Amino acid sequence: MPTGPTIITGAAGFAGTHLLDRLAGEGTLVGWDHPDKTSGRTLTGGLEWRGVDLLDRDAVRAGLEAARPSRLYHLAGVPHVGDSWRSPLGPLLVHVRGTHHILEAIRDVAPSCRVLVVSSGLVYRNSELPLDEDAVLASSSPYGLSKIAQDQLTLAAAREDGIDAVVARPFNHTGPGQDPAFAVPGFARQIARIEHGLAPPEIAVGNLDARRDVTDVRDVASAYEAIMRAPVSGCALNVCTGTAYRIGDLLDRLIALSTVRVTVRVDPERLRPSDVPVVCGNPARVHAACGWTPTIGLDRLLADVLDFWRHKTTRET
């Protein structure tokens, strides 16, 4: 059993908040977020908030030295692939330099801390087939390139510095609370606004033919916990379902849950410069090594996302 606290970087983010819910009650949790975002947050239910800029090497070192954690989940990052085309430097700084600062400080001041670094399923070369962890690493986006660097930096730290580190490579995940800049919550928000009479009965969309392996974020949080507890180190593990769904089919399922009739319009502004046709992972290794498998089905996932936006829209009206 760990004796020190557990640190979660990016704790206030989408996956971070679900991981906090998952770990609640299991000892002291320390949520790291940017100093600009932690003002007014206090200790609640065993959770402490700390403002730490991951790009500040000294601040990262001081934070780890003060906490002396037993475990660290590194979720902080720049999440949107499309935004990386407009600002490619952001993902590189946060994913690569920020991760380097964490691994360096752990090596020097908290060498017994176990680390899970969240990379991405977008580190792999495009393929029509489900990708396992031995697939070739290559990416067509600045976001993916930054994740490859983060991924390999972590594995090198485990190999060369003896850090007890493991990499999670989550494929697409969604769920209640995700920013509507992403496809599924974006569709659900538009439907909720139409149902409340706040928008005309038309949904603006991007590329509907892309196929994605989509996991519920609550299952992803359970995967991170399972990986952290498993006797694996110095390796990467996919977090995914093994099934890729056409984005247009996900939209059709959401529309079928709507209480109103809607039409669909392609918005050129929502199309990316490079959109990978198929992204699908093979979860066999994480299942064998950690006993993890997703438990939340697609129908419940989509219904929960739509209900989230219905409730949120109701509060805003």
Image (cartoon, rainbow, N blue to C red):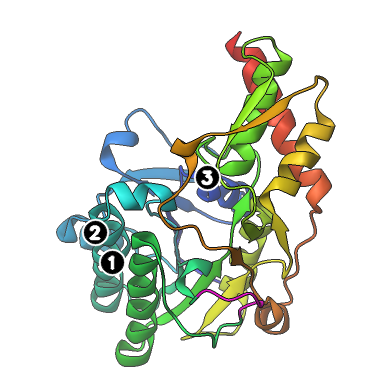
The amino acid at mark 1 is Val
Q: Main secondary structure of the magenta part?
A: loop
- Judge whether residue 128 is colored magenta: yes
> Judging from the image, what secondary structure is the residue with disc 2 in?
helix
From this viewpoint, is residue 31 visible? no
Q: Distance between the residues labelled 1 and 3?
A: 20 Å
* CB within 8 Å, label 2 to label 3: no
**The C terminus lies in which quarter of the figure?**
top right
Q: Distance between the residues labelled 2 and 1?
A: 6 Å
Query: How far across and down, in percent of the image, does residue 231 sit?
Result: 59, 84
Task: Magenta stretch: give its range.
Answer: 126-131
The amino acid at mark 2 is Leu
> Judging from the image, what secondary structure is the residue with disc 3 in?
helix
Which residue bears the numbered disc 3? Answer: 14
Q: Which residue appears at 40% of the width and 75% of the height?
A: 151
> Judging from the image, what secondary structure is the residue with disc 1 in?
helix
